[in-house]
Image: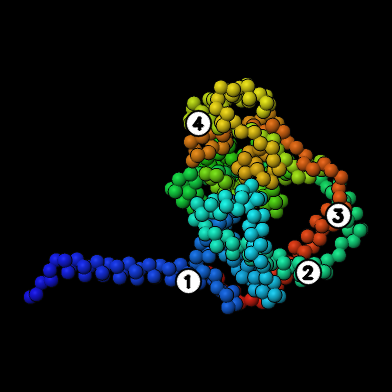
Amino acid sequence: MTRLPFPRIARALALAALALAGASATATAQNLFAPVAKVDDMVVTRYEFQQRRQMLQALRAPGDLDKTAMDRLIDERLQVAAARRAGITLSEEDIAAGIEDFASRLEMSREEFIAFLAEQGVAEQSFRDFIVAGLMWREYVRARFAPRVEITEAEIDRAIRLRGTTGSARVKLSEIFLPTATPQFEAQARQLAPQIAALRSIEEFADAARRFSAGPSAPRGGEVEDWIPLENLPPQLRQIILTMKPGEVTEPIEIPNALALFQLRAIEPTAATPPANPSVDYASYLIPGGRSPEALAEARRVAALADTCDDLYGILRDRPPEVLERRTMPLARVPADVAIELAKLDPGESSVALTRDNGATLVFLMLCERLPGDAEEISREEVRLQLRNQRLAAMAEAYLEKLRAEAVIVRP
């Protein structure tokens, strides 16, 4: 029997390994770009779906991210196709301006936002495709529907009257925070969250809070003790709560290091008129040590000495300046987890419910002041524009629903 010399055997094995690796890589690439949904003759690939889901996760989008990603990609296929049939095109300047505008809403430059997405595994082209779809649909809606929209002076008068007479409401909530600081915690949280979101019993939610919540309200069954004015809640949560009935639970909301779920226990109207575009002035003292006894003791020390945010500067004068942050900004732009905690506080009150750096830093959060927002005289032209945009949005959604009904959509 003829035996191959060892070098020839090694070369043969190496070539076989390379061939297998190449075949595996090709199969992986083919699988990545395989269709996962079809809209008429257009497809949504697995890669596009994964990229959109990662982008939604990076932007802390609430709810079922798989469903949201797929729904939006399918809608965008229909929207872009309709725009192209109407001859809508975009210039590179249009696209660049759209990207800059989106990034600016998060207080980032285009370059900073692209770098942020890259860190989350989202390719620049995937974000660009998202922007292009939105811009094309907006231009199509303007071209098709804007000439049909007429806002009368009587409609403007009515809208202004309603602005001045609309009351508000206050709510009682319970909360659960499922930690996601480690891969193991995140896997457990994502498994538990849908089960908790399906609960409708106050008692069952309270039991789940005691067993699973990482929030300080866990021993109380997740109960937030005081009534919360609806306008104090972050806009994202406020809109969800308004669609709920007592006993219902929100979909999980992604916040730093946790998935948050809220149960509406009670809601009642109030006579007060909510302020327009409210802002908050708040301070954060970052304490090393996370929820260690030493860090919590430091937080209690500061809380006992500080009656207002201004007191913090003197109390912490021997600390590095970077550990104390004070910000004033519209409530809509406050990070969701911070806004949720601020909603529970009166000016001068504090919270130690939050951590940063995967739990290594405790956040002593104090509400300095609530600000009413814009107090300038109501502009009729501003009201006209708002009514016009509302009318266009309603017409666009109705037309998109028609496109969905007429399309042949195959999804998982």
Q: CA distance from mark 1 to mark 3?
A: 49 Å
Q: Which mark is residue 145?
A: 2
- Residue 346 in sight from this viewpoint: no
Are the residues at dot 3 and dot 2 in contact (C-beta closer than 8 Å)?
no
Q: Earlier in the sequence, mark 1 or mark 3?
A: 1
Q: Secondary structure at mark 3?
A: helix
CB contact under 8 Å: marks 2 and 1 = no
Alpha carbons under labels 4 and 1: distance apart? 47 Å
Comes first in the chain, label 4 or label 2: 2
At label 4, which amino acid type do we have?
Pro
The residue that label 4 is drawn on is 288
Give the class, few, some or many, for how many residues have Cα within 10 Å of label 3's Cα (few <14, many ≥20): few
Secondary structure at badge 4 equals strand
Please give the residue where the numbered disc 3 appears in the rendered image: 381
User: In the rendered structure, which disc, 2 or 1, sits on the residue that comes first in sequence?
Assistant: 1
The residue where tag 1 is placed is 34
Q: Earlier in the sequence, mark 3 or mark 2?
A: 2
Separation of marks 4 and 3 at Cα, in angstroms: 51 Å
